[in-house]
Image (cartoon, rainbow, N blue to C red):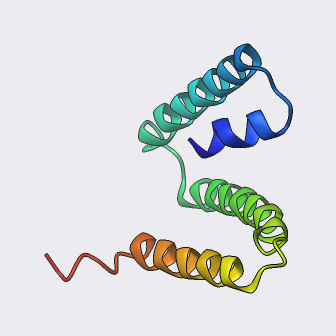
């Protein structure tokens, strides 16, 4: 949903949005396949791959972060920050409770 919203906001029409999102998802599946079949790689190669992937996620996050608080209304900014904190909490396994 987020990708579609970003593409539509970036002036993509419906056909371009579906095509672009489909291509990105197919590339993601290739990445998953490569990751699942990487058991033959050395530990150093895996470390470099993980650093590359983490760097890409940090780059994307920094781009999103600069737009996160662009709204000048305080209440909306507070809601966005609460959403960010809840999302990080869930991503870190905060709802697991050791089960």
Q: In this view, does 94 lie above or below 61?
A: below
Q: Is residue 25 above or below residue 91?
A: above
Question: Residue 95 placed where, x, y %?
Answer: 28, 77
Q: Identify which residue, 98 or 2, lies in the foreground.
A: 2
Question: Residue 87 placed where, x, y %?
Answer: 49, 71
**How many numbered marks have been drawn onto this rendered protein structure?**
0
- Left or right? Give the position of 71 relative to 47: right
Q: Identify which residue, 73 or 14, lies in the foreground.
A: 73
Q: Identify which residue, 9 or 3, lies in the foreground.
A: 9
Q: Quadrant of residue 69?
A: bottom right
Residue at x 78% of width, y 79% of height: 73
Question: Residue 25 placed where, x, y %?
Answer: 58, 29
- The N terminus is located in which quarter? top right
Residue at x 65% of width, y 35% of height: 4
Q: In this view, does 98 lie above or below 47?
A: below
- Left or right? Give the position of 57 relative to 62: left
- Left or right? Give the position of 12 relative to 21: right
Question: Residue 12 placed where, x, y %?
Answer: 81, 26
- Left or right? Give the position of 11 relative to 50: right
Residue at the extreme top: 15
Q: Quadrant of residue 96?
A: bottom left
Residue at x 65% of width, y 27% of height: 21
Residue at x 67% of width, y 41% of height: 5
- The C terminus is located in which quarter? bottom left
Q: Is residue 21 above or below residue 54?
A: above
């Amino acid at each position: 949903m987020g990708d579609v919203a970003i593409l539509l906001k970036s002036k993509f029409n419906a056909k371009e949005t579906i095509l672009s999102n489909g291509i990105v998802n197919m590339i993601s599946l290739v990445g998953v396949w490569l990751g699942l079949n990487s058991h033959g790689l050395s530990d150093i190669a895996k470390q470099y791959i993980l650093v590359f992937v983490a760097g890409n996620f940090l780059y994307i996050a920094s781009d999103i972060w600069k737009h996160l608080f662009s709204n000048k209304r305080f209440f909306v900014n507070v809601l966005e920050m609460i959403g960010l904190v809840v999302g990080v909490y869930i991503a870190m396994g905060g709802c697991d409770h050791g089960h």
